[in-house]
Amino acid sequence: FCFILALYALRYIHNNTNRIIHCDVKPENILLTEHNGCEIKLIDFGSSSHSGSCFFSYIQSRYYRAPEVILGLPYTSSIDIWSVACVLV
């Protein structure tokens, strides 16, 4: 259940106001706390960028890397969703 909250965190950073791509979603960057139920914190925005701005060629940890990043294609915030799905699996 708590990993579903990771999607809410991504929705917040991906919304039209923030437009941030995390670029490194992995288990080490998802913190779970037991304070008033289940709370999640998404951390380590060191390789993040704004949508449409500077894109890096080497992003995401190997095991959570989206296909478009592997192929060197332009990417969007959907790469974060791919990484969360990999974490869930």
Image (spheres, rainbow, N blue to C red):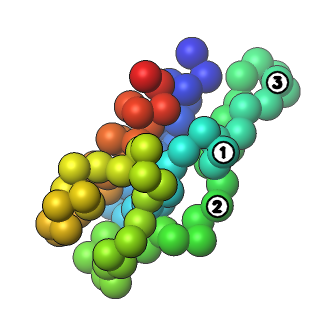
Residue name at image x 47 percent, y 25 percent: 88
CB under 8 Å between discs 2 and 1: yes
Q: Residue furthest front?
A: 62
Asked whether 4 or 61 is in front, the reply is 61
* CA distance separating discs 1 and 3: 17 Å
Q: Earlier in the sequence, mark 1 or mark 3?
A: 1
Q: Residue furthest right?
A: 35
* Circle nearer the viewer, 2 or 1: 1
Residue name at image x 67 percent, y 36 percent: 40
Q: Quadrant of the C terminus?
A: top left
Horizontally, residue 30 falls left or right of residue 77, namely right
> Where's residue 4, x and y in %?
50, 25
* Circle nearer the viewer, 2 or 3: 2
Q: Is residue 37 above or below residue 75?
A: above
- Read off the residue under disc 1: 28
* Circle nearer the viewer, 1 or 3: 1
Res 44 label: 2
The kind of residue on which mark 3 rests is Glu
Horizontally, residue 18 falls left or right of residue 26, namely left
